[in-house]
């Protein structure tokens, strides 16, 4: 959706909201494709009642024909480099070249424990994965072709910004008020110039909404982000629970230079989809 | 609902007032370990903005407070037997003791219970518990706040004096042990605050670590006798201290919330501690009102509202603390530039904002800078280096050229661009043979050429193992390129882990004399090129085992002595997994240190996007030339079709 010349609006699939059936996830993607949104996006965590991001996007690829399919973000180092590359390339090929691959190091040790992967050294491994996926290091022996996969990197550390500027096409912000996004965007632009990249990075932002049952949405966020301690309350307080709040949020992100803003549901009901469409109309 | 507030300072008392105003049904008790009239420190400063907030929150106490205020709008800077003044800054201050009396009286009026001489040993049993008990908060022990305390800035000691200053005064005094400075401001008709500060080594050299309270007071009195006009300093447990910078990951835990210095401190040199504390009280009381005493929701609102502002203030305070920590390196600046550097130290005042507050000051700076009575702002003043004159400070355009085919970054590199003012001679070293930067950086070519470096480790994942550089050939290549160069400034690239840069860093070069080869190249090029010669250097590797800023400053000095006219300040990229600190103007503070400590002209970029930044940086002596990254102005957008009225259809 184009609210103006600047910001595109994407919508999150409810793949990390417990209770979202396969039917709801796919119907959600279908409506997004028919509706005004420019992308559908997924989050990732392992130890939670949630869908695998690449499997979900592969299914969404079959249910859609137009929207971009984005991980916002996937935790790269949970997978071996070649398998990550293969999964991403497969979604990209199945969707006719619509993948936006957002990667970051992840924040929860329990996901790494469950996957049987060392948590330590995850930043270094992510750097290698990005170099592998973007570079031409395997002579295309691990197909399908990765050509044209749009890569984003998320994270707030200095190293996250330099990995983004070195290997990616853009930056995936982790949410928060427009002011926080503007600050991160400034850092991303500074890193981009420092690495000698021409032009500008694509800047992706995200937010959460619950327009019908705000308390249910906020309870979900408190649960989903319980691992962050008191920070969960701040994330829940940022849940967009009215059309007014959605509009202000979009305008704030637009002014901060956001290229694509993805709004994620916190209640897995198709009614929520309709309400967001109305709020944006 | 009952509320126990631990700490009877301005934050605790003010919150008590606001909570009783909000709801007379709430019992509010303030517990203070000291006596009601005990207070440490002398005066506290407020800004106009804070006063407005105090007026809105409680007009009664605002009236009392402003009644006894000292107000002024001038900053005086006394440096090298000169005094420079800047106007338009609107400060007010009050005796801390008087402020407490007013707030205590207002508390009593509103039925707050005040208990003095009470030590709180355990978490009070109340519905809401507030930790307003200062930097050394005991209440923080009862929650999980993620508290961090680290010292910042120089040694300082807090006095009062009966000399009444008529401006906020910064005084600098050179001694045989080093530079001391004082921060002084009036807080009522009789008294001023007088803080003395000096870096820790100066403090030791002067023997202050061995003097007692009276002796150190006498020392300071004598040192600043001129400023004190023969008046006395007064002590109130005035001991030399290190300022503790306190941060907390969160400001609430269960039914316990912290505010003021217990939650965050800001270095005294920007005078914001009490102001932040009382604004916290206003924000917390408003959140409790809005959330109808739903504590968790109110605490989250309070933190979300205050945190960004507090963090910005703490960042500015840290910049200010660091500025005074290295104040001696600015002694060679002309007084007007020294003063402008001081006023703009925390990044909150710029050339443009100062020109609104005090046009006379910026005009004086501009005319000193431009050398004419009426001069444009500093970035528009000319600059001359080795016979080449630039009409402005942002005129340079970069271009780079590889000195040899193997030194090309990627195959697309133009061999010889022309018409560039600053031409950078580079050899990419182990970062060579990569794909175009439009795809990414440091992505090796599938069919690349061999790369060279003083280390055997590849630069980035999947990179080639570097071979040994043929040093004679490298020198010859640089010299040959310099001979044929058509440029106004020639630049040698010794930054970002390219060939010469990797010689400079312990991360990538094991030899003891790491300057050996870079200096050899510099001297050879210096002999071959008569015009201005710049050297681009990563002055920190942004890595614990790499070069630190002090090393970078030493490198810059050595390069200057070997004939470099200009240091182009960069940072990091010596190795691919360094720990960079990106933000707007991320190289400015580094350039400031190189220019003023290595005493060499500098050129700096680092995502500077406005002319105001350029004017401030150049005017304050933080760099001589700047590289601007001006974004496309976004003042225009296409109109949608809906704005086109199709008259024909309307008629139909």
Image (cartoon, coloured by chain):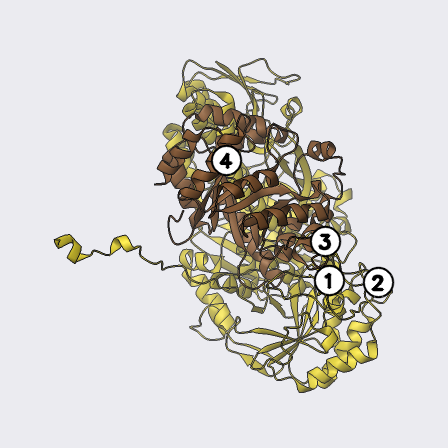
Chain colours: A brown, B yellow
Query: What label sits on residue B552 in the rendered view?
Result: 1
Mark nearer the N terminus (1 vs 2): 2
Q: Nearer the viewer, residue B525 or A147?
A: A147
Whether residue B585 appears in this view of the structure is no
- Name the element at disc 4: helix
- Distance of label 2 from label 3 (alpha carbons): 16 Å
- Please name which of the two marks, 1 or 2, marks the residue nearer to the observer: 2
Mark nearer the N terminus (3 vs 1): 1
How many numbered marks have been drawn onto this rendered protein structure?
4
- Name the element at disc 1: helix
Label 3: which residue? B577
- Please name which of the two marks, 4 or 1, marks the residue nearer to the observer: 4
Label 4: which residue? A26
Subunit that carries the residue with mark 2: B
Within the image, what quadrant is residue B159 found in?
top right
CB atoms at circles 1 and 2 under 8 Å apart? no
Q: Position of residue B367 (x, y in %)?
A: 47, 71
Neighbourhood count class around disc 1 (C-alpha, 10 Å): few under 14, some 14–19, many 20 upward: many
- Name the element at disc 3: loop
- Distance of label 1 from label 2 (alpha carbons): 24 Å
Subunit that carries the residue with mark 1: B
- Distance of label 4 from label 1 (alpha carbons): 57 Å
B606 left or right of B204? left
Whether residue B81 appears in this view of the structure is yes
Within the image, what quadrant is residue B441 found in?
bottom right
CB atoms at circles 3 and 1 under 8 Å apart? no
Name the residue located 44 percent from the left edge and 34 percent from the top edge. Answer: A240
Vertical position of residue B603 compared to residue A6: above or below: below
Label 2: which residue? B456
Q: Position of residue B124 (x, y in %)?
A: 60, 15
């Amino acid at each position: 959706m184009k609210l103006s010349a600047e910001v595109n609006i994407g919508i999150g699939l409810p793949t990390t909201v417990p209770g979202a059936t396969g039917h709801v996830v796919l119907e959600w993607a279908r409506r997004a494709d028919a509706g005004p949104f420019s992308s559908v996006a997924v989050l990732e965590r392992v130890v939670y009642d949630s869908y695998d991001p690449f499997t979900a996007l592969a299914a969404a690829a079959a249910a859609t024909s137009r929207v971009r399919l984005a991980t916002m973000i996937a935790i790269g180092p949970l997978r071996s480099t070649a398998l990550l590359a293969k999964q991403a390339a497969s979604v990209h090929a199945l969707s006719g070249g619509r993948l936006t691959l957002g990667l970051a190091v992840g924040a929860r040790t329990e996901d790494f424990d469950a996957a049987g992967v060392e948590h330590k050294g995850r930043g270094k491994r992510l750097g290698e994965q990005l170099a592998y996926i973007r570079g031409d290091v395997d002579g295309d022996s691990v197909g399908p072709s990765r050509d044209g996969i749009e890569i984003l990197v998320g994270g707030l550390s200095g190293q996250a910004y330099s990995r983004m500027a070195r290997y990616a096409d853009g930056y995936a912000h982790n949410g928060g008020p427009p002011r926080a996004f503007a600050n991160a965007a400034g850092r991303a632009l500074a890193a981009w110039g420092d690495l000698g990249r021409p032009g500008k990075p694509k800047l992706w932002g995200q937010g959460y909404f619950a327009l019908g049952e705000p308390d249910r949405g906020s309870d979900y966020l408190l649960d989903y982000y319980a691992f962050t301690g008191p920070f969960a309350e701040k994330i829940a307080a940022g849940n967009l629970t009215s059309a007014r709040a959605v509009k202000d949020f979009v305008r704030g992100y637009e002014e901060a230079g956001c290229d694509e803003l993805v709004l994620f549901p916190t209640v897995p009901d198709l009614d929520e989809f309709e309400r967001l469409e109305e709020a944006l109309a | 609902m009952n509320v126990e507030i631990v700490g009877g300072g301005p934050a605790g008392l003010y919150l008590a007032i606001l909570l009783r105003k909000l709801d007379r049904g709430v019992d509010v008790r303030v517990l203070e370990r000291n006596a009601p009239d005990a207070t440490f420190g002398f005066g506290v400063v407020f800004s106009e903005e804070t006063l407005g907030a105090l007026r809105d929150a409680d007009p009664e106490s605002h009236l009392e407070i402003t009644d006894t205020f000292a107000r002024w709008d001038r900053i005086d800077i006394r440096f090298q037997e000169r005094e420079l003044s800047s106007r338009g800054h609107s400060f007010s201050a009050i005796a801390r003791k008087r402020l407490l009396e007013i707030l205590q009286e207002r508390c009593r009026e509103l039925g707050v219970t005040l208990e003095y001489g009470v030590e709180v040993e355990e978490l009070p049993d109340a519905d809401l518990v507030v930790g307003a008990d200062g930097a050394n908060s005991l209440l923080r022990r009862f929650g999980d706040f993620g508290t961090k305390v680290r010292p910042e800035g120089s040694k300082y000691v807090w006095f009062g004096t009966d000399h009444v200053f008529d401006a906020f005064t910064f005084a600098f005094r050179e001694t045989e042990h080093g530079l001391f400075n004082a921060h002084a401001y009036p807080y009522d008709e009789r008294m001023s605050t007088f803080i003395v500060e000096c870096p820790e080594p100066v403090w030791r050299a002067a023997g202050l670590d061995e003097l007692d309270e009276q002796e150190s007071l006498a020392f300071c009195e004598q040192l600043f006798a001129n400023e004190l006009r023969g008046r006395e300093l007064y002590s109130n447990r005035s001991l030399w201290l290190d300022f503790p910078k306190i941060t907390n990951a969160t400001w609430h835990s269960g039914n316990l919330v912290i505010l003021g210095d217990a939650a965050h401190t800001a270095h005294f040199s920007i005078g914001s501690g009490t102001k932040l504390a009382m604004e916290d009280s206003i924000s917390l009381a408003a959140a409790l009102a809005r959330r109808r005493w739903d504590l968790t929701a109110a605490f989250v609102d309070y933190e979300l509202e205050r945190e960004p502002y507090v963090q910005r203030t703490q960042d500015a305070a840290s910049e200010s603390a660091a500025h005074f920590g290295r104040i001696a390196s600015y002694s060679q600046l002309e007084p007007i530039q020294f003063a402008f550097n001081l006023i703009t130290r925390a990044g909150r005042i710029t050339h443009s904002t100062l020109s609104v507050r005090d046009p006379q000051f910026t005009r004086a700076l501009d005319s000193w800078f431009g050398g004419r009575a009426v001069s444009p702002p500093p970035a528009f003043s000319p600059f001359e280096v080795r016979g080449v004159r630039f009409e402005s400070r942002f005129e340079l355009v970069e271009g780079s050229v590889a000195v040899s085919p193997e030194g090309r970054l990627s195959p697309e590199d133009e061999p010889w661009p022309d018409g560039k003012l600053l031409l950078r001679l580079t050899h990419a070293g182990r970062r060579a043979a990569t794909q175009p930067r439009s795809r990414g950086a440091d992505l090796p070519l599938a069919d690349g050429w061999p790369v060279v470096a003083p280390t055997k480790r590849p630069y980035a994942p999947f990179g080639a193992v570097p071979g040994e550089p043929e040093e004679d050939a490298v020198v010859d290549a640089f010299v040959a390129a310099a001979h044929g160069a058509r440029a106004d400034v020639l630049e040698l690239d010794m930054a970002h882990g390219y060939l010469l840069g990797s010689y400079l860093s312990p991360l990538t070069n094991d030899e003891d004399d790491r300057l050996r080869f870079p200096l050899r190249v510099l001297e050879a090029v210096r002999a071959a090129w008569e015009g201005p010669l710049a050297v681009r250097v990563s002055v920190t590797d942004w890595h614990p085992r790499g070069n630190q800023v002090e090393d970078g400053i030493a490198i810059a000095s050595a390069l200057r002595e070997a004939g470099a006219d200009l240091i182009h300040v960069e940072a990091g990229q010596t190795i691919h997994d360094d720990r960079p600190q990106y933000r707007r103007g991320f190289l400015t503070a580094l350039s400031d240190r190189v220019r003023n400590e290595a005493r060499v002209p500098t050129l700096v970029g680092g995502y500077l996007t406005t002319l105001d930044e350029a004017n401030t940086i150049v005017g304050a002596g933080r760099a001589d030339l700047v590289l601007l990254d001006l974004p496309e102005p976004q003042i225009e957008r296409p109109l949608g079709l809906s704005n086109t009225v199709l008259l024909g259809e309307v008629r139909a």
